[in-house]
Image: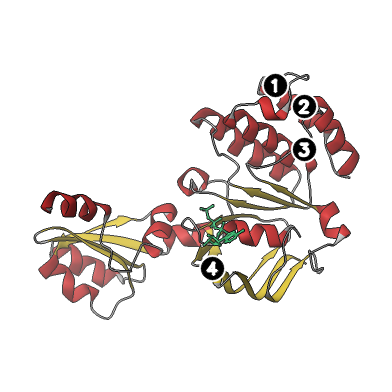
Amino acid sequence: MKAIKCEALTKTYYRKKALNDLTFSVEENKIVGLVGRNGAGKTTLMKILSGFSKAKTGVVEVYGRRPFNNLFVSANTIYIDDQMNFPTTLMLNEILEEGRRFYHNWDHDLALRLFEYFGFHRKQHHNELSKGKESTFNMIVGLASRSPLTIFDEPTTGMDAAVRKDFYRALLKDYLAHPRTILLSTHHLEEMEDVLEEVVLLHEGSLHLHMSMDDLKEYSVGLSGKISEMEPFLQGRDVLYKQNRAVDDCYAVIRNDLTGGEYRQMQQAGIITSPVSASDLCVYMTSETSGKGSVDDVFERSADR
Ligand SMILES: Nc1ncnc2c1ncn2[C@@H]1O[C@H](COP(=O)(O)OP(=O)(O)OP(=O)(O)O)[C@@H](O)[C@H]1O
């Protein structure tokens, strides 16, 4: 069964299309990374899936039901972000108790063990926590809920590197023991490559790519060498990214469909091939193409004045 199904989904804010003709689906019990540049539409999509907001046109289904104002979807979905507001009168242990009352799969023992491991005190209040601690507490709620669809929107905001590592490990361990569908947006794809099974890349509200993490890692290859030597190899190919690095030196990323013979020809021409990480590939594929150049140009222009 599909946990998520979107068909031609569009959401507009005033005249701006936050989601534009978005079609993709996610099978049950997958752990999926949602990535894209700032403003790509990740939060908008997650809020629609959680039933908090309504699409303008298109179809969206969570476990076969339209999520907006739907009790079944609310009971089977949790949305965790860094702006969660819990009642300020409740202490942290009371918030966990509320979680136990609401979420039918809630694992209170797990919640309490994580609570203790991360050094929380029962009588603290959510609005008194530091940013990183707030995210850590929210993460505990998200994991302990064991919701069939668990949505984490940038869950590691403010967490230090050690806590982020603990989070990825806890997420993976709990997911393996209790499979469910987890959709997680992140700007730290490089840290999550071993956790995620699939990646959905959004760009300007549209689907740019949806594939398994294994395929994504193999999808492209980096080439560096002299421009004059590279040009013949790049002609007619799917060039995903290209940057001139020095007067006669260039780096390009192409689809990884080279034959053994082509690899040998490149070596003979002095072109160096290298793997491209999934995270770098996503950045390259969605890099600005509006002719604004790089941030270096901003400083060069101001020096010219
Ligand atoms: N409430 C709103 N009112 C008006 N425009 C909005 C609103 N929420 C989002 N947008 C716009 O919709 C687009 C997508 O925003 P969204 O927050 O979904 O992106 P995102 O991928 O989550 O970005 P980030 O990585 O920065 O969190 C942006 O252009 C944003 O300005």
Amino acid type of the residue that numbered disc 1 sits on in the rendered structure:
Phe
Q: Of discs 1 and 2, which sits in the foreground?
A: 2
N-term mark: 1 or 3? 1
Q: Position of residue 47 (x, y in %)?
A: 68, 57
User: In what element is the residue under mark 3?
Assistant: helix
N-term mark: 4 or 3? 3
Real-space CA distance between mark 4 and mark 2, rounded to the nearest whole angstrom: 36 Å
Q: Which residue is mark 1?
A: 120
Q: Which residue is mark 3?
A: 144
Real-space CA distance between mark 1 and mark 2, rounded to the nearest whole angstrom: 8 Å
The mark tally for this picture is 4
Amino acid type of the residue that numbered disc 3 sits on in the rendered structure:
Ala
Residue labelled 1 has its Cβ within 8 Å of some atom of ligand 1: no
Q: Are marks 1 and 2 in contact (CB under 8 Å)?
A: yes
N-term mark: 1 or 2? 2
Residue labelled 4 has its Cβ within 8 Å of some atom of ligand 1: yes
Amino acid type of the residue that numbered disc 4 sits on in the rendered structure:
Gly
Residue 271 visible in rendering: no
Q: Which residue is mark 4?
A: 205
Q: Of discs 1 and 3, which sits in the foreground?
A: 1
Q: Which residue is mark 2?
A: 92
